Image: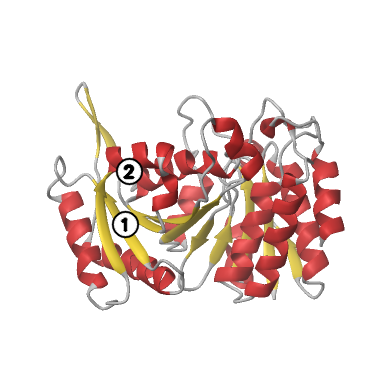
Amino acid sequence: MKLCVIPGDGIGREVIPCAVAVLKRVLPDLDFVEAEAGWDCFQRTGTALPEATLDAIRACGTALFGAVSSPAYKVEGYRSPIVHLRQALDLYANLRPTRTLWSAAARLGGRPQAVDLILVRENTQGLYSGRERMQGEEAIAERVITRAASERIGRVAFELARTRERKTVTIVHKANILPITDGLFRDSVRAVGQAYPEVAVNEMLVDTAAMMLASRPAQFDVIVTTNLFGDILSDVASVWGGGIGVAPSLNLGSQVAIAEPVHGSAPDIAGKGIANPSGAILSAALLARHYWNLPEVADRIERAVYAALESGTQTPDLGGQATTQALLAEVLRRL
């Protein structure tokens, strides 16, 4: 097996080596190929995603992507490399699980809830389709939803749900306000569900889903939704798992998978040695579970990360004083 490693910008360069160190411990025969992408790459080369990087990802079949910075203003020729990758490699499914980090959930007030959910996000369409334009004094963005893309993300959700204990899919949409686009999404996913009689199907409006994820997240098992809704709702859910620094994700296609922590490049803390590597390490575990079909390896990694965090070895984003390297050392010790 081969893995293309793309640290990117900012803290990506600090947390991705931690995930690589963990993978070397549990998969000593895994080969690593270095590649580059991001804002720094753009400033040096004029492209945020070199063709050589795309070629390396295709050749490896998998990649571990750190984080990239984006300019605060429009820059001619710059395009988000991760969005570009999702579309160029047809990475149509984004998986974002959340499990309770008890030490973090206890600080939210009330009684912590046993959360174990996975959000399945359509990853190539919606408002992230890249169709924006100026029309006079109007700025217009087109939201693209197709039956084919809705059906295939629905199949991902139902296939996941049938392997889980609760076997429940919640379709999240806003069809009361967007009856054509979200109506098509909802109806397409429901139609797919008819082939999975063992899986229960619910649906919920996105605003209600946001409220429930903030207050009663334990009710959810598998959530399937559109691109922008999934991006936002997964961040809401991540609070119960320790926040953005702990949240992992996997961009999954039919030929290629790219693991990617949810957090950004965090330029305010880059270089200080205090970034939380948990999201990057747990993203590597998703790669092992959902692409390499190595659930035992994924279980080992996840147990080590959560045990390390619950033991009190926590970086400042979780209220602790541990450095990036200290948390990595504790994870490796537990492995």
Q: Residue furthest front?
A: 111
Q: Mark 2 or 1 closer to N-term?
A: 1
Query: What residue lies at 45% left-to-right and 62% top-to-bottom?
Result: 91
Q: Secondary structure at mark 1?
A: strand
Q: How far across and down, in percent of the image, does residue 189 sit?
A: 25, 64
Q: Secondary structure at mark 2?
A: helix
- The circle drawn on residue 244 is none
Residue 118's place in the image compared with 235, above or below, is below
**Label 2, on which residue?**
209
Q: In front: 95, or 55?
A: 95
Q: Residue furthest top?
A: 137
Q: How many numbered marks does the figure carry?
A: 2
Quadrant of the snapshot with the N terminus: bottom right
Q: How far across and down, in percent of the image, does residue 100 sit?
A: 57, 48
Can residue 204 be seen at all in this image of the molecule? yes
Q: Amino acid at mark 1?
A: Thr
Residue contact at pointers 2 and 1, CB within 8 angstroms: yes
**Res. 33 image quadrant:** bottom right
- The circle drawn on residue 170 is 1
Q: How far across and down, in percent of the image, does residue 304 sit?
A: 75, 58
Residue 297's place in the image compared with 233, above or below, is below
Q: In front: 264, or 322?
A: 322
Residue 65's place in the image compared with 111, above or below, is below
Q: Amino acid at mark 2?
A: Ala
Q: How far across and down, in percent of the image, does residue 64 sit?
A: 64, 57
**Res. 159 image quadrant:** bottom left
Label 1 CA crowd tier, 10 Å (few <14, some 14–19, many 20+) = some
For the residues labelled 2 and 1, the Cα–Cα distance comes to 9 Å
1 lies left or right of 61: right
247 lies left or right of 326: left
Query: What residue lies at 47% left-to-right and 51% top-to-bottom?
Result: 84
